[in-house]
Structure formats: C-alpha cells, structure tokens
Amino acid sequence: MSNIGSYEQRIKNFDWSLSEKELDYKAGDVLNIGWHCTDRICRQGKADKLALIWEGRGGKEKRYTFNDIRLATNTIGAFLRGQGIKPNERVCLFLDKVPELYLGFLGILKIGAVVQPLFSAFGDESLHVRLENAETAAVITQKKHVSKVRKIRDKLPHLRHIVVVDADPAAPLQERETAFSLEKAAPVEHLDIHPTSAETPSVLHYTSGTTGMPKGVQHVHYSLISQYLTARWVLDLRDDDIYWCTADPGWVTGTSYGIIGAWATGTTQCVLDLGFMTEAWYKFIEKHRVTVWYSAPTAIRSLMKTGEEVVKKYDLSSLRHLVSVGEPLNAEAVIWSEKVYGLPFHDSYWQTETGSIMISNYPGMKIKPGSMGRPFPGITAAVLDPNSFAPLDEPGKVGLIGLRPGWPSMMRTYWKNEETYRQKFQNGWYLTGDRARLDKDGYFWFVGRDDDVINTGGHLVSPFEVESALLEHPAVAESAVVSKPDDINMEVVKAFVALKPGHPPGADSELEIMNFIRKKLSPLAMPQEIEFVESLPKTRSGKIMRRLLHAREWGEEIGDTSSLEND
Ligand code: 6R9
C-alpha cells in the first residue's frame, strides 16, 4: 500500500495541518529546515541510520549517518557564524555534487542565512550576474572552481568570504579566501539553531533561464510543509527506501527533493557526483539497491537511446517506484520504462516558483501515458482562458495552467523584483506560464510553454506533440520543435533532430520523417523543415532550449544563455 493510499480520499477535506502535525509544527513555532532534516530525525531514534551514500568519480565512496549529518551541518554553521555571516545574508554554494554541497545547504539554514545554490559548471559571467543580484556575502566552493570567483570578486563589493572546502596547503590562498575542511574541523556537538520561523527566507534559487533573464525565486522555511508531504505521497518515500534523485542542487529538484524531501522524511539517499552515463547509472542502481528513482525526461530519453539490451546486463530488481520531472514526459517513455524496467515513470509537474510538486501521477492511481496527472491534494489547479483568466469549463480546451495561491512552498517574491512577481497573478490565480488541457477525468495534459505554442494558419500545434511523435520514429534519438516564419501560415513547424547511430541524415531521411508525422498527426503539424544536428542545446537541468532555436529561426536576440549546458 502506498503512502498516499487513495487519492480520492486524500483530496477530500485535505488540510496542510496534516503535514504540520506529522512534523510536530504549530503556527508560531520555530521552524528550521536544517534542524528538521538532521536533529529531528536523530531524536526519532534514527541517529545511526544512513542518511547519505555518496559516490564520486572513480568509485570513491563516503557514508554519513543522520548523526554524522547533524554534526557536519552544525560544524559548517558554526564556522560560517564565526566568519561573521549574519542571519538573512546570502551564502552561495558553488560546488560539484560533493558532500559539502548537501551538508553546507543545511548548515547555512541552521544559522538563519539564505542559501543560494548555483551550478558549479556556470562560467564566471553567469556567476557574476547572480552573485551581484543577490548581494551574496560568501561563496563556498572548491579549488577547481575558485579561479572563476577570483575573476569577478573585484566587481562584487558585498562578497566578503570565499570559502574553499578542499584548499591545497601548498597553494597560497588569496584575498578574502579561507580554507575549511569538513574532515579536519572539530565536530560541533551543540549549535544554537537560529530561531527561524515559517516566513523566514530560506533558499534563493535562480530560475533555469528557459525564459528571459534569471530571476531569484525566494522561498521560506515553511516550504518544508509542502516538500515533506509531497516526498511522502508522490515519491512515496518510506523508512527502508534507498532513494536516488539524479538532479543537481543547482536546480530546484535537487534541493526540494534531493535534500529537503529526502532527509525531512528520514530517508537514506544516494548521490552520484557524475554526469549522465547509461552504464554508470545502471551500475549505481544495482550496487546501492536503489528503490525510488527521481529523474528527468532528458535522462530517460538518453536511456531509451542506449536501448534495452544493456538493461539486461544489470540487476535493477531493487527499483520499486520511478518519478520524472522537468519536461514533458512523452507517452513513449512511460510505455518504454514499463516494458524494460517493469515500472512506469510517474510524471510530476512543478516549477522553481512553486517549490514543490503541483500536479502528478500518484502511486496506485491509473496512469494515462503522456498526461502529467492530477493536482496534489490541497492544490487547486485549473486551465484558464488566456484572456479572462477564468477557468475553462469544457474539457479538452487548451488554456493557461493557473494555481490558486496559498500552498506552503509557494515563492514569496522574486528577489528585488516585486513587480515581475506581481505580474504573475491574475484574477486570483498564479500563472505558471504553461499551457495545458484538462480531460474529463481531471487529468492535465501539457501542451507547451505559453511562449512555445505554434500557431500555424490558426491551428495550434504543440511542439511537445510533434516531438513525442518524432520520438516514435525508429531513427530519431532526440528532437526539438519550434516555429519558423512563413508568409502564408504565419508560422510553420520546424524540427531539429538528432538521429540514432547508424541512421544517416539526408534528404531521404528528412522526407521519411516528415511523412511519418504527417500521417501520425496531421499535415499541419508536419515539420516543413528538418534540420539534422549532432545534439540539442540544453539547460543544465536538461531542458531543451527551444528559445534559443526559436530565436535563431526568427532572427532575434538570443538573450541570456547562462544556463546552457555547453556554454
Ligand atoms: C521543477 C522544475 C519549470 C518548467 C515548467 C514547465 C516545465 C516541469 C514538467 C514540465 C511538462 C512536466 N516542466 N515539469 N513540463 N511536464 N512534468 O522543472 O522547475 O526548472 O523552474 O522549470 O519546466 O514548463 O513551467 P523549473
């Protein structure tokens, strides 16, 4: 029996106080995510339970119990406090997926400071924009990344400390730099946790940059109430699970569920400090007996590309629940995973701004492949008319996904950008900027970003639909569909396609694939042009940067590309 039990029962009379009770929280209490994920779990008699199994390059492994992470987060917190970091100041984590990233995150929260996690692969310019905007007081980094910070530190008057977690005793540190070694520091048994409350700022996440300039999304400690319960009911985390969230904490999935959701529920989680590699991933699941796996469509598509044969080389029988987030999960991928792993991927939909899962497929609930599922209990989601912002009554109509504000993990503002924040609300709804349709059973079907839908001769074509169809073609490994200008139809469909090995690009392939789509969807949805590429531009969280391809087609400015994978 899953944690959520019956979805229908759960949505009746749902109240967030249910989650508050499970976390022993009452309005007005001190609420600190750092404490909840460590000290509280130890007090529940799980001090010796494994919290983190970490694997680095070359198979190097480290293990931490809940007591170990309680001590480590105390130690980091005390160190930062000793450096003069004050509550509410921003501390940036600019680290690979090393243990200090996960432990630093909670240590910063324990002293009431605000965590600003950034992808370690960011270049100095991307880093500069975000540190300047957040007026960040300290950056915690590794020696391999410190040169990027050195390059920009003179332009950052607020940056007082650059902390290097693996400083080389032989290489001298420079101005504002301090060495801190978690392994060598004396463990701090007792730390005065800063008495943060529900509305105290906690995490400042810069959005993935799929649209426009990066914005700092401000979350508060009360987000825990949503993150905890969604981890229990969507990820279905239980006491004996070995959980693997493949997301980097530079992305909200890696913090809400790769740190907070995992540890607030007292779950053992593993981390692999390595990019995507099919066989290394399967080996990791086999070795650690992973039971719950939270990943993203881009990874799933890559696994599909490597095929079924390789799956047979590994014992993946420990897996019991698979969940996906970040991009549309194509029906094809759900069917494929059911076939090869014996388990379907469950789609989940949310955003940096929402802080936790909003719409999802729940364990035990019927999956309609290609659908995102239904709203989490306590979440009111609707498909809105794009002009009146009133819910569309008729099922099947495409509109904007709106969410009724008021759930615990909703962003509180965009950092220093209240105006843009306010513009996200209309007629009492928070506008996600995504489009979907609702079916008669209350399932949401993603159509595209509000700015992605292709209007060809008055017919709306979803790039997602075309991409899904393209994936069903045996030669197609990956695709991105954008609009391109057209004299008669205003816009037509253009596809960028990466082919599987052994399938040569060329006019024949192009015609073949066009016909395939024409037959499968409609002549309108058929790409008028297919451009074959080696790979597609992606954000660090794996989203295809359609915006970039779109801008190229329309001869527009490309805008901020700081979160591009290959910049
Ligand atoms: C968690 C996260 C949010 C945007 C969102 C939407 C897209 C996320 C999706 C999905 C289709 C899903 N998105 N999950 N689209 N199906 N299951 O991804 O946050 O990086 O802020 O991105 O990603 O467009 O609006 P974030």
Image (tube, rainbow, N blue to C red):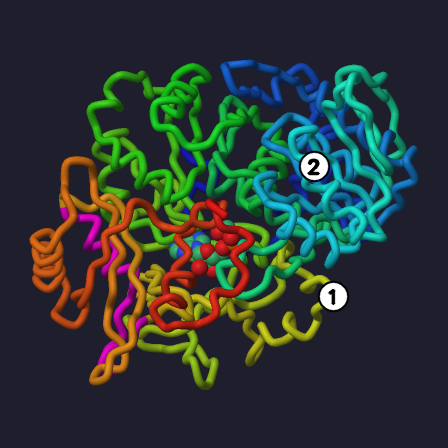
Task: Determine which residue is flagged by label 1.
Answer: 416
Residue occupying image coordinates x 66% and y 32%:
101
Give the percent coordinates (x, y) of residue 172.
Answer: 82, 24
Residue 147, disc: 2
Q: Quadrant of the N terminus?
A: top left
Mark 2 neighbour class, 10 Å CA radius: few under 14, some 14 to 19, many 20 or more: few
Q: Amino acid at mark 1?
A: Lys
Residue at 14 percent of width and 64 percent of height: 521
Residue 393 lies in what quarter of the image?
bottom left
Q: Is residue 424 left or right of residue 565?
A: right
Q: Is residue 369 left or right of residue 226?
A: left
Disc 1 residue crowd, few under 14, some 14–19, many 20+, Cα 10 Å = some
Q: Residue 55: say if magenta.
A: no
**Tag on residue 85?**
none
Q: Is residue 208 above or below residue 39?
A: below
| Residue at screen point 20% across, 85% down | 488
Which segment is the magenta one? Answer: 454-473
Picture layout, residue 358 above or below residue 139: below
- Residue 549 image position (x, y, % from top left): 37, 61
In magenta segment, residue 459: yes
Element under disc 2: helix
Q: Residue at x 62, y 27 (%)?
A: 98
The quarter holding residue 340 reads top left
Question: Is residue 358 in sight in this rendering?
Answer: no
**Viewer-nearest of labels 2 and 1?**
2
Residue 44 x/y as whole percent: 70, 25
